[in-house]
Image: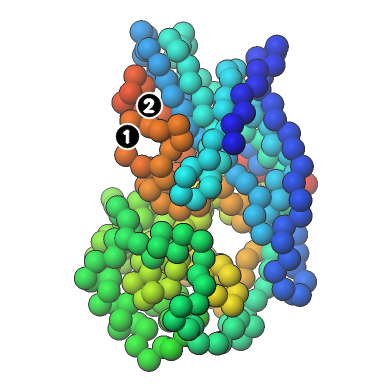
């Protein structure tokens, strides 16, 4: 999908409505509506810069969320593309010979997110049969990746944790319990936040990225397709404010489809441990799916390990002076 618009005022805007998400079961679920602003700021653009290219992840609707309205407020033209592996939407901007040291623009959303409460006993207990139809691009969700590595150590842990478990559901639950018991939510020191399974195994601490990279790697090593999702967690006790990114995981059951898990929130809130295995809360804002994202149009650099912040290239080289800020307001 590609779009390029420029209004006379210099502010680019796009608005659209989408259909309601697909129903997933009969469980009544709460809904949360909020406005969300993703602000991009690029500083220290050097004099004489020839060309700046900017890629920014765009949120999309899925089974749990509806993007009711989207506005891109930018001083320059933009395009919307889609990555080839995961179908993520990507906002792309290009500036020739920029005459400014700083560039800022906003992406503004009005969002409705549906929660769903499911328990371990609600999920199918049927044995996974060989040859059963799996998710689209199944190999992608079973593969080792640049930092989400399925090596000998991961395979050993996975075999030990899932010993005696016969179904994919039982394996996923055992892995979920193991990650919560083994990891510590701790952002001290260096190395956390990159989603490195080597780091997670050796240091056994980190943030949501590290928790769920370990879960996904162990699930994949056990033959259970699993995938990475990232966005933001809207606080339950604030009507508005600023938030950081948050990620979670999903594993696949042929009888159920994609099942959400949030091991890091369960670690922080032990009373919600059972809820966060299989349930989806209505304050999760989903922006991007997957790891090692191949940007479109193609970038000069390597695929992006975790695509939640802008990726920028200046004259064909990575430019690390871009930042983002997320703000929300419950409506």
Image point 51% across, 61% down: which residue?
136
Query: Can residue 271 be seen at all in this image of the molecule?
Result: no
Query: Can residue 134 be seen at all in this image of the molecule?
Result: yes
**Residue 191 falls left or right of residue 312:** left
Contact, CB < 8 Å: mark 1 with mark 2?
yes
Residue 94 picture location, percent across and down = 48, 21
Residue 297 picture location, percent across and down = 45, 32
> SS class of the residue under badge 1?
loop
Image point 32% across, 77% down: which residue?
158
Residue placed under numbered mark 1 in the picture: 301
**Residue 101 falls left or right of residue 200:** right
Residue 169 picture location, percent across and down = 50, 81
Looking at this rendering, what residue extends furthest in the bottom direction? 164
Quadrant where the N terminus is found in the figure: top right
When the figure is inspected, residue 103 is found, relative to residue 276, above or below; the finding is above
Question: Residue 313 has which mark?
Answer: 2
Relative depth, front residue between 22 and 328: 22
> SS class of the residue under badge 2?
strand
Image point 70% across, 69% down: which residue?
24
- The 10 Å Cα crowd at callout 2, few under 14, some 14 to 19, many 20 or more, is many
- Which picture quadrant has residue 98? top left
Mark-to-mark CA distance, 1 and 2: 8 Å
- Which picture quadrant has residue 150? bottom left
């Amino acid at each position: 999908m590609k779009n390029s618009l420029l209004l006379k005022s210099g502010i680019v805007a796009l608005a659209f409505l989408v259909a309601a998400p697909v129903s997933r079961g009969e469980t009544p679920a709460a809904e949360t509506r909020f406005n969300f602003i993703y602000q991009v700021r690029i500083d220290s653009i050097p004099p004489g810069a020839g060309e700046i290219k900017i890629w920014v992840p765009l949120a999309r609707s899925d089974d749990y969320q509806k993007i009711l309205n989207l506005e891109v407020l930018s001083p320059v033209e933009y395009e919307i593309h889609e990555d080839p592996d995961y179908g993520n939407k990507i906002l792309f901007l290009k500036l020739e010979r920029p005459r400014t040291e700083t560039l800022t623009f906003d992406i503004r959303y009005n969002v409705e997110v549906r929660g769903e409460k499911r328990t371990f006993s609600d999920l199918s207990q049927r044995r996974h049969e060989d040859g059963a139809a799996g998710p689209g691009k199944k190999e992608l969700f079973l593969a080792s990746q640049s930092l989400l590595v399925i090596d000998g150590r991961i395979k050993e842990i996975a075999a030990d944790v899932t010993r005696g478990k016969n179904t994919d559901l039982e394996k996923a639950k055992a892995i979920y319990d193991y990650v919560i018991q083994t990891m510590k939510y701790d952002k001290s020191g260096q190395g956390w936040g990159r989603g490195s399974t080597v780091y997670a195994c050796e240091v056994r601490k980190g943030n949501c990225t590290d928790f769920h990279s370990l879960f996904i790697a162990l699930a994949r090593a056990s033959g259970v397709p699993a995938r990475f999702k990232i966005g933001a967690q809207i606080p339950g006790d604030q009507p508005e404010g600023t938030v950081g990114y948050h990620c979670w995981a999903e594993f696949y059951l042929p009888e159920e489809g994609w099942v959400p898990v949030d091991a890091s929130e369960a670690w922080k809130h032990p009373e919600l441990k059972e809820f966060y295995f299989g349930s989806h809360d209505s304050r999760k804002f989903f922006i991007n799916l997957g790891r090692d994202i191949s940007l479109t149009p193609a970038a000069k650099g390597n695929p992006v390990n975790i695509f939640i912040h802008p990726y920028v290239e200046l004259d064909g080289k990575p430019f690390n002076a871009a930042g983002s800020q997320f703000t929300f307001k419950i409506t």
